[in-house]
Image (spheres, coloured by chain):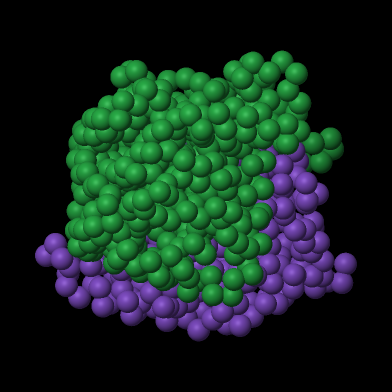
Chain colours: A purple, B green
Amino acid sequence: MRVALFITCYNDTLFPATGKAVVQVLERLGHTVEFPAGQTCCGQMHWNTGYQREALPLLPRFMEQFEHAEAVVSPSSSCVAMMREHYPIMAERIAREGGDATLPERIAVLLPRVWEFTEFLTKKLGVTDVGAYYPHRVTYHASCHGLRSLGLDDGPESLLRAVRGIDLRKIERPEQCCGFGGTFAIKNADVSGAMLAEKMQSVLATGAEECTACDNSCLMHIYGALHRGKTGVRTRHIAEILAGEPQLQADLREGR
Amino acid sequence: MSSAVETRLDPRTAPSFPKAAKALLREEQMRANVRRATETIQGKRGKLVAEKTDWQQLRESARQIRAHVLQHLDVYLEEFERNFTAAGGHVHWARNAEEAQQIVMALAKQVNAAEVIKIKSMTTEEIHLNDVLEAAGIHAYETDLAELIIQLGHDQPSHIVVPALHKNRAQIREIFRREMNLPEIGETPQDLAEAARRFLREKFLRVKTAVSGANFLIADTGGICIVESEGNGRMCLTLPETLISVVGVEKVIPRFADLEVFLQILARSATGERMNPYNSMWSGVTPGDGPRNMHVVLLDNARTEVLADAEGRQTLQCIRCGACQNACPVYRQTGGHAYGSVYAGPIGAILTPQLMEMEHGQSLPYASSLCGACYEVCPVKINIPEVLIHLRNKVVNKKGWYAPEALAMKAAANVFRSERRFRAAQRLARMAEKPLVRKEFEIVGQQQVEPQGWVKWLPGIFGGWTATRDLQAMPEESFREWWEKRRV
């Protein structure tokens, strides 16, 4: 399948390793990855903070870049949730305000082909074993948009369970928000920090070496506190685990 | 440590949510009490919801009934008025808090009431009725146990179902010991309930006028329904001669039969019970039985303004179960007083600013990480995150284009509209960040570890991030730069 990667603005800028891992996994599974060069941002930050007018032009831009893709895959559940929940509303508004009247119908046709990375693997491709090796203790943080907006359920953890060598630890209160919430982390920094402190305790209580998730936004926030607290525990996007560690992969191939 | 808030919770004068929250986060005992209480109720709710195989259908029915009422509010309110009046009751219409206060005071004066007993009512809290009555020389005794604790503790409610949820048993004992003058009072729940019972029983037998709210107004029977756990409400509804109920206009439901849906979802959502222990319903006056003088004050207080907003309207579907408060990870940290209103938590974050016609409480729509836990538990399916986003848009539109945040957001939007500008911004950010980056762990013992840069301090509003978290430094190369090299 020809997969168009929507890397998202913050993964592009801050977490290129996640994008590389997505490419590695998809290619390993025999798919062709494309990267439409004109892509930027889905508009989530603007829309969710109340700047709806500013978010609107990002929808036609997304359409222009991805409309003809066979499948669109994005390693961010919050961006995919943004598109599923709000792009239809945004398209209606653009049409109502005298913009492109074809947008509502076109976005309705495109959206079923837009997937979050792990749901593309489990729901579209029907794969749980992607051939990864990752000999570490890991706990999975179910980000709110993945859990409640996209309904990823057991999908991401089923992928992790199939990873060779992994010791997957259950986290307590998995449904509890980590406190990131986009601009919430800045506007309500104190409350966000209090929520984060609880999440950090839960992560540490698992005894895991790493906390993973389908969203680098939550992980950036969680890692920030784990690092500040000198806990020695880090975070890693699920795609990077599913890609396996390159050196270890090489070791395996050479029988070391 | 005391977490009592003596000044009334008024969105017009309250500090912003972040400011109030910052202070409350220092109250460890209150936070422990809130965590424990909300977890307990949530646990009970979860078990009872799980046993209902038709829970999602019940939610959908409840949503449809409430949405239907809001579409035809005028019809159902007039039907209620006709039927309640025909049964010997009196209906009064109040456009705002002041009118409602005046009506209640005039009714109390008609019967020469120097004191009233009260059933727990958030609507009377909303209009600060007790303060107004007190100023007019009429003392109001709260009879709901939690409201009594709040009143005796000179405190304010922090939860719409469990107003004293922020207090633990030891603190309640201390309030009773001091205010009821019981130096020897014990500390078991039975001791405390016994003290409250003795304190209240005398009021029930003496006071001739009661003030209540209502859970539901029933249009087709002209009935009123109140559900409660203690039976103190039942006392107020049966013993006095005069009963005055202050009720928001949105509380009406079409038919008595609709209670089938609401009584199933309300008790489960609110207190984690299959049914409320006391379900009281009355429609008008019955000679020789209960109050002879029955009044309903129908309160608008900006509810029709909310109704006029197609996207905000669903807020009025609320049946005040408090499930969103118990599920909210923000409320869990701060408790209810941070919201500066008697309506705290997610429902307060959307209701308060709308009742204030967006003139006050503007920080409340931002008091959420949009995690969606509130929507998931809401028994009438109010999409609280969607309404929060809608209200944020209203706040932004009120703020004007010249606000610093608005200018920054416009600049960012401009960057995202062009690939060239986006690339330039990535490069610029990398350069701008350089002076703030600290390289760490370059040499560990004999081992060379990949150096990692961290930002420990950021200026201005971004300082909120680095107050509690470090920030990973930006990588040398963006994904798209890597992709282009890879293809060559």
Q: In which quarter of the image is the N terminus of chain B?
A: top right
Residue depicted at x 55% and y 22%: B153
Residue depicted at x 64% and y 69%: B51
Image coords of residue A202 (percent x, y): 71, 47
Is A204 on the left or on the right of A73, as rendered? right
Q: From this viewpoint, is residue A118 visible? A: no
In which quarter of the view is residue A66 placed? bottom left
Image coords of residue B101 (percent x, y): 27, 31
Image coords of residue B280 (percent x, y): 47, 53
Image coords of residue A109 (percent x, y): 33, 80
In which quarter of the view is residue B259 placed? bottom left
**Residue closest to the eye, B348 or B149:** B149
Is B64 on the left or on the right of B36, as rendered? left
**Residue closest to the eye, B200 or A102:** B200
**Residue closest to the eye, A90 or A29:** A90
Residue depicted at x 81% and y 49%: A207
Residue depicted at x 62% and y 52%: B42
**Residue closest to the eye, B178 or B290:** B290
Relative to A141, does residue B154 appear above or below in the rendering?
above
Residue that protrudes farthest toward the left in the picture: A98
Residue that protrudes farthest toward the right in the picture: A256
Relative to B51, does residue B193 appear above or below in the rendering?
above
Is B314 on the left or on the right of B263, as rendered? left
Q: How many marks?
A: 0
